[in-house]
Image (cartoon, helix red, strand yellow):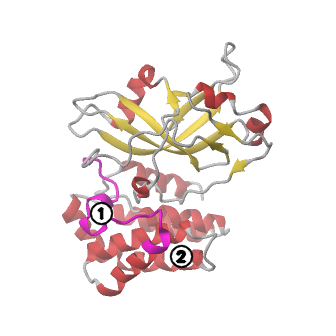
Amino acid sequence: MGRVDANPDVGDIVEPNVGEGWMIAEVWRAWPPPHNAVRGELAHQDALVALAGPPRRLGYLIPVEVTFERDLTNARNPWSWSASVDETVVGVLDAEIASLITPDLARAVTEKFTVAGVVRGGSTRTPTLGVHVWLGRAITPTPRLDLGPRLEVHWPPFDHEGEETVRTGLSSMSAWADVDLRNPIAAIHRARDMLSTSIDHLDRHFAFVVLEEALYQCRDAISGALDDFDETCSMHDFEMDAIRPVLVERFGGVPVLSTYRQMAIRRVKQGDPAAAAWWCRRGLKLYGTEALRRDAVDDLRDRLAGF
């Protein structure tokens, strides 16, 4: 078994580094391989099936936020960390990795941290569901661990894996099949070129989706990227009344519209709850009764109720 390296310095923490729309825009498909760092999923298949669904031909690829939390009830293993999705336990953190998270480091992240992950499996041939995680893709402050290639899983997904899952629809658009958001600068140029040349509503919608995510990724590297992000979201919204019926015709409903959740969060961070509430209401109006993902609607409603 190869060695896992961890920087022992207290406070060596990865700050949140994932854009708000990471799962909705499906940028995770272009990330490096995730790690098989969650154990014990077999004991939690009922919870995973409730999250994903029963076995189907092409299985599932569902991006999720995975929260690891110290399990202080485990007297036999004081370094045990539970792994949860939507507050439901789905396994535990790999024991060797858990042993590297020192008490000081654990306290530095309040003994709880969240990273990007994916629920995978559930095909008719291989019905078991598992959870893979990108430990370096931090949703909240996260311990810095260098796993290298050990524990990496096969990636990218095989052709059509999990294809039945409907989110933004980006992965089903051939024009964006080769977009690589690991190179956000190239993605920005690609999206802007599309917006400057195409009048097709679907092309423009997905160009906005890609541009918004790429600009957010570059917020610390490019001066004014967040201002460009805000302007892009406003332009995207301006065209949504024309885009919406095309989405419904293409997908049978309205896929996730990440723009509205992202901008609601942005406006809250800027101390403007009235503007945040506007973005929530606008998103809910566009979803109407034809949303393909109920959780996206519930998210906006919950945010709006909090203002």
What label sits on residue 230 in the rendered view? 2
Residue 270 appears in which quarter of the rendering? bottom right
- Label 1 SS: loop
Residue 55 as seen in the image, left or right of residue 113:
left
What type is the residue that disc 1 sits on?
Answer: Ala
Residue 114 as seen in the image, left or right of residue 245:
right
Residue at x-position 47% and y-position 39%: 152
For this rendering, which residue is in front, 149 or 91? 149
How crowded pointer 2 is (Cα within 10 Å; few <14, some 14-19, many 20+) is rated as some
For this rendering, which residue is in front, 58 or 199? 58
Q: Residue furthest bottom?
A: 196
Residue 172 part of the magenta-drawn span: yes
x and y, in percent, of residue 167 in the image: 34, 54
Q: Marks 2 and 1, how far apart in space?
A: 26 Å
Residue of label 1: 177
Residue at x-position 76% and y-position 38%: 105
Range of residues picked out in magenta: 163-187
Quadrant for the N terminus in the image: top right
Q: How many marks?
A: 2
Residue 70 appears in which quarter of the rendering? top right
x and y, in percent, of residue 118 in the image: 43, 42
